[in-house]
Amino acid sequence: GENVEQHPSTLSVQEGDSAVIKCTYSDSASNYFPWYKQELGKGPQLIIDIRSNVGEKKDQRIAVTLNKTAKHFSLHITETQPEDSAVYFCAAAHTGNQFYFGTGTSLTVIP
Amino acid sequence: ETGVTQTPRHLVMGMTNKKSLKCEQHLGHNAMYWYKQSAKKPLELMFVYNFKEQTENNSVPSRFSPECPNSSHLFLHLHTLQPEDSALYLCASSQEGVETQYFGPGTRLLVL
């Protein structure tokens, strides 16, 4: 089955700086890569996703890049704010099949 | 809010108790999922229902019993649980043919 690795497990940045979280996957058939944000006491919320026919996608301060050849994808958050502090999860899936999640990155934005 | 609600939000139970977790989605989706979230581990898929039919059971112990009476409601019946079953149990839903899953807030379960 699929194996998703996520790094780093914890990340601290100063407010206004950028944060980058990286994930690798093993199954070349995976074609859907969502990113979720989980705040304390809440369930994961989808923040951005990318499909394998696209190399990059942006939504305001958040961007995701995908390198299919290397089997890795990354989340980029620019101009970080304290409310960005949360746990972020990546996942990989093949259409119609189950999601495989990374172990999460705890992001702290220091004011 | 994501349109997926779960009750109760917190549950403490003994190993001999029987309890049920409830999930309801208001998104018109036809697939629903149960996940287990433990500290330092990836989310673990437990069960999948498509159009009320169970299509996935990831080797989950029989002390967990799912029920999906219709495409909007999903239950997880619990009995004779073990302390290692303590975790956050998340429900999610999606539309067939669309991969995006929407999660509820979870039920924090503590087994004593």
Image (cartoon, coloured by chain):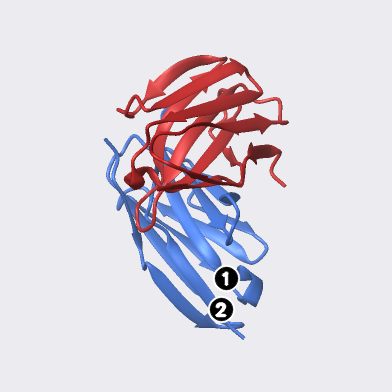
Chain colours: A blue, B red
* CB within 8 Å, label 1 to label 2: yes
Image quadrant in which you'd find residue B60: top left
* Gap in angstroms between the C-alphas marked 1 and 2: 6 Å
Inspect this view and state whether residue A95 appears: no
Image coordinates for residue B28, horizontal then vertical, percent:
71, 25
Q: Give me the chain letter of mark 2.
A: A
Q: Which residue is mark 2?
A: A109
Name the amino acid type tagged 2.
Val
The amino acid type found where label 1 is placed reads Ser
Residue B66, image x, y percentages: 48, 23
Q: Alpha-carbon neighbours of circle 1 within 10 Å: few (<14), some, or many (≥20)?
A: many
Give the residue at mark 1: A85
Using the rendered image of the protein, determine whether residue B59 is visible from the camera's viewpoint: yes
Q: Indicate whether B22 appears above or below A41.
A: above
Instruction: Residue at 55% x, 65% y: name it.
Output: A86
Which of marks 2 and 1 precedes in the sequence?
1
Residue B34: give x, y in percent of width and height. Answer: 48, 33
Q: Nearer the viewer, residue B63 or A41?
A: B63
| Mark 1 element type | loop
Examine the rendered structure and indicate whether residue A64 appears above or below residue B102: below
- Crowding near the residue tagged with mark 2, few <14, some 14–19, many ≥20 C-alpha atoms within 10 Å: many
At x 30%, y 27%, the residue is: B59
Question: What secondary structure is found at the residue carrying circle 2?
Answer: strand
| Identity of the residue drawn at 44% across and 52% down | A90
Q: Quadrant of residue B29?
A: top right
* Residue at mark 1 shares a chain with residue at mark 2: yes
Q: Chain of mark 1?
A: A
Any mark on residue A3, and which?
none
Is residue B106 depicted above or below A89 in this figure?
above
Q: Residue at x 33, y 40 (%)?
A: B82
